[in-house]
Amino acid sequence: MLTMVFWESPLVQSAGYFSVVVLCLIISMVLFEIVTKYKNWEEIQKGNVAVALATGGKIFGVSNVFRYSIEKHNSLPEMIGWGLFGFVLLIVAYFLFEFLTPKFKIDKEIEKDNRSVGFISLSISVGLSYVIGASIS
């Protein structure tokens, strides 16, 4: 009986969700590192603001998708599944953004510290995270 009460504690549940989302966020950042042509953390360390904006947008976007998933789904596996589905949609959006701008390459512009492109990338990640979140909840 005590273990059942322990697992139902809001503090324990919050710690569990937090831990799982941080792990999923790390995994998503590794996947974004693979997908982009530049090295996110090396560029940020060099002071590349465009990469920092784009990466910050991705972090916010993924976190926001998981926020919606936590809010709506009652079980941890269900929350993870829907959150990962939302993350996949963010990756698809990234490729669409690259495809829909044929006049220049998004990755090259962000790597060159084109802050306008970095800001648009951030805005797309954040904006679509709300749409994705609403659709999975």
Image (cartoon, helix red, strand yellow):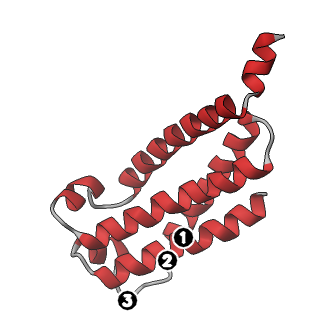
Given the image, on which type of amino acid does mark 1 rest? Val
How far apart are the alpha carbons under marks 1 and 2?
A: 5 Å
Q: Nearer the viewer, residue 2 or 48?
A: 2
| Disc 1 and disc 2 in contact, CB within 8 angstroms | yes
Q: Residue at x 28, y 78 (%)?
A: 109
* Badge 2 density bin: few <14, some 14–19, many ≥20, Cα 10 Å: some
Q: Which residue is mark 1?
A: 126
**Location of mark 2 (residue):** 123
Above or below residue 79? Residue 55 is below
Dot 3 or dot 1: first in sequence order is 3
Residue 32 appears in which quarter of the rendering?
bottom left
| Residue 66 % position (x, y) | 63, 51
Q: Residue 38 got which mark?
A: none
Whole-angstrom CA distance, mark 3 to mark 1, is 23 Å
Label 3 neighbour load within 10 Å: few <14, some 14-19, many 20+: few
Per the image, label 2 sits on a secondary structure element best described as helix
Outermost residue to the left: 46
Point out the frontmost of discs 2 and 3. Answer: 2
Specify the label residue 103 is tagged with: 3
Q: Mark 2–mark 3 contact, CB under 8 Å?
A: no
The picture quadrant where one finds residue 129 is: bottom right
Mark found first going from the N terminus, 2 or 3: 3
Q: Residue 2: give x, y in percent of width and height.
A: 78, 11
- The Cα–Cα distance between marks 2 and 3, rounded to whole angstroms, is 20 Å
Dot 1: few (<14), some (14–19), or many (≥20) neighbours within 10 Å?
A: many
